[in-house]
Image: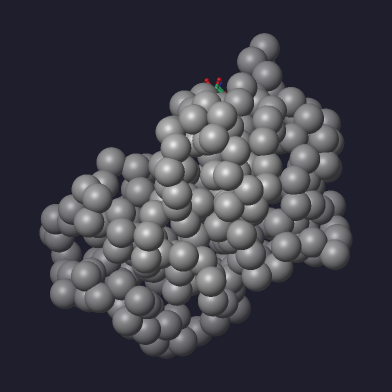
Amino acid sequence: MPLLEINDLNVRYGEIVALRGVSFNVEEGQVVTLLGANGAGKSTTLRAISGLAKPASGDILFDGKSIAGLGPEAIVRMGISHVPEGRRVFPGLTVKENIMLGGSNRKASKAELSGEADAMFDLFPDIRKFSGALGWTLSGGQLQMVAVARGLMAKPRLLLLDEPSLGLAPVIVQAVFRIITEIRLSTTVLLVEQNARMGLSVADQGYVLETGRIVLGGKPEDLWANEAIAAAYLGGHGKPAAGLAAH
Ligand SMILES: Nc1ncnc2c1ncn2[C@@H]1O[C@H](COP(=O)(O)OP(=O)(O)OP(=O)(O)O)[C@@H](O)[C@H]1O
Ligand SMILES: [Mg+2]
């Protein structure tokens, strides 16, 4: 049984149809990447899974149970953590407190959460020096690391990552993707990316969304193998980014 199963999902924002008949699965232990241009429906797909957008029809099964229409808190408690677009970090809190917030869905003591947040800095050494500071100024990449660390504090079975590389310099993008290769060792990931090369470099399966429909799906090597498809949907020809292979 797939960890996540999306069946014929339709989502509307008023008159706007954002998703039309979207179906795909995420197997436990995999990284699945959703690609597509601006407005294709990538974020809406994640928002529907995490309960932020209500499906008009269709179903979303997590671990075999329907979660379509449940509220975001109930869905987090079931083990799905969503790191949304943008880097929402609370300026009045320290970096460590920001990270600890991610565990507030769990029945863990403050001491436990504190210890786990400290351990997060092993995965994100670039932000360790900001741990206890107030009045910090973080770069875009560092804010992204705080957001991902907060998502991981929920100890999710499924982590939803929305464009973690957006707006970051290439070297920081590499750092963020290196972290994804670490995360994938313990957590199933559904990743949204516009950067097809990077997105597919860590993926077991990829899907391309176009105006709310899945127009293409398969293993990264099969998606790249079709030159016409690669040119039309994957931002040109070429192979996945070197050095970041998923296996
Ligand atoms: N809150 C909203 N109200 C109305 N329409 C929305 C809303 N959010 C998204 N849409 C519309 O739904 C469609 C899908 O948007 P979505 O944000 O899912 O796309 P996306 O693939 O994540 O795009 P991007 O790459 O720009 O983040 C678009 O046509 C968008 O304009
Ligand atoms: Mg989006």
Residue 212 in the image: above or below residue 14: below
Q: Is residue 133 left or right of residue 66?
A: left
Place residue 48 in its image quadrant.
Answer: top right
Q: How many marks?
A: 0
Q: Is residue 47 left or right of residue 67?
A: left
Residue 207 in the image: above or below residue 133: above
Place residue 11 in its image quadrant.
Answer: top right
**Residue plotted at (82% across, 42% down):** 7
Residue 7 in the image: above or below residue 81: above
**Residue plotted at (85% across, 58% down):** 65
Front one among 1 and 115 = 1
Query: Residue 3, position in %: x, y?
Result: 75, 63
Tell me if I can see residue 43 in this picture: no
Front one among 116 and 209 = 209
**Residue plotted at (25% across, 75% down):** 125
Query: Residue 96, position in %: x, y?
Result: 30, 72
Q: Is residue 108 left or right of residue 121?
A: right
Tell me if I can see residue 96 in this picture: yes
Query: Residue 142, position in %: x, y?
Result: 25, 59
Residue 157 in the image: above or below residue 5: below
Query: Residue 46, position in %: x, y?
Result: 60, 44
Place residue 207 in its image quadrant.
Answer: top right
